[in-house]
Amino acid sequence: MTTATAPSAYPASVGDLLPAVRDLADRLGEIPSRNRIMREFRVGAPKAQAVRLALVAEPITLPDDIETEPTSDPWEYAEPAPVPPVPSVETTPVPLILPAEKVAEPLPEVDQVGHPPVTAEPSPVATKPRRLATWPVVLIALPAFVAIWSGWVGLGGLTGFGVVHPLPGIADGFSINTAITLPIGVEVYAAYALRAWLSGMVPPRARRFAKWSAIGSLLVGALGQVAYHLLVAAGIESAPWWITTLVACLPVAVLGMAAALAHLSGEEVEQ
């Protein structure tokens, strides 16, 4: 059964709806819910709730043949009010600070009667490594010096090196054989560069230069000795032009490499 409501041009007020809702409650035998009022009288939720609360506030007289039931809670069917969204707030995480760990103190040592105290074995003392003796190097270098010196001086004679007067007009009697510049320049620089390479006393850049220039100087020295002995064994009194060209460039090349190595060593040390 549906409740007939009078059409109206304007929405019905709470006072106009109250009698009709009361009649509906009499027929049902209980106070209708808000949704039932909205559906029966086609009103909104606020107005339906207001009419229902007004009906609950006044007593309802029911017929004697209808068993009465306890009045239900007026908010039993009420829809929860919308909860406004809570704006999200970015929180900065608080670092967790743990309490400092307490280190257990060592227990005092207790001397036991009849037992000697236990002592830790002394750690072995680091001994400084002994340096390798250098006197065998001097002994080995003596015959090598004689052979290398004679070979370079002889090759210098075959390539145009010879006696010159370096101080004309000052000391005319002073003369020097320029062939000695070959063993002094090439072999001494090879030993100097070898020392810089293996000692570790120079920066990495200078050490790399010393490594390759030392190897190159030793190879040039070996080739010079080979060239001299081959020329002598063949009975040649004058070296070919290309050997003379290479030998004549050796003093200049040795001077350049020595200056470069000294510059690299000192430049990075100052930085």
Image (cartoon, rainbow, N blue to C red):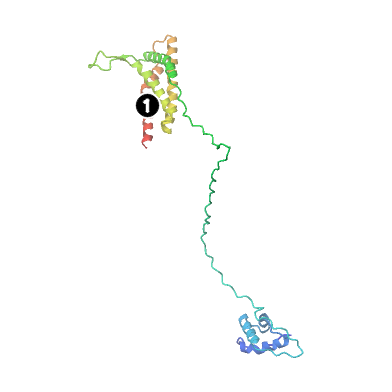
Residue 231 on image: x %, y %: 43, 12
Instruction: Answer with the quarter of the image where residue 180 lies.
Output: top left
For the point 41% across and 33% down, which residue is it?
Answer: 203
In the picture as drawn, the residue positioned furthest to the top comes out as 235
Name the image quarter holding the N terminus. bottom right
Instruction: Answer with the quarter of the image where residue 14 lies.
Output: bottom right
In the picture as drawn, the residue positioned furthest to the right comes out as 65
In the picture as drawn, the residue positioned furthest to the left comes out as 169
> Which residue is under mark 1?
258
Please determine whether, in this image, residue 63 is positioned above or below residue 229: below
Please determine whether, in this image, residue 235 is positioned above or below residue 114: above
Label 1, secondary structure: give it. helix
Residue 246 vs residue 16: left or right?
A: left
Residue 114 vs residue 250: left or right?
A: right
For the point 63% across and 89% down, which residue is it?
Answer: 16
In the picture as drawn, the residue positioned furthest to the front comes out as 113
Q: How many numbered marks are there?
A: 1
Name the image quarter holding the C terminus. top left
Please determine whether, in this image, residue 187 is positioned above or below residue 96: above
Q: Nearer the viewer, residue 260 or 95?
A: 95
Residue 240 on image: x %, y %: 41, 15
Residue 55 vs residue 88: left or right?
A: right
For the point 62% across and 89% down, which residue is it?
Answer: 15
Instruction: Answer with the quarter of the image where residue 184 lies.
Output: top left
Residue 43 on image: x %, y %: 63, 83
Residue 229 on image: x %, y %: 44, 12
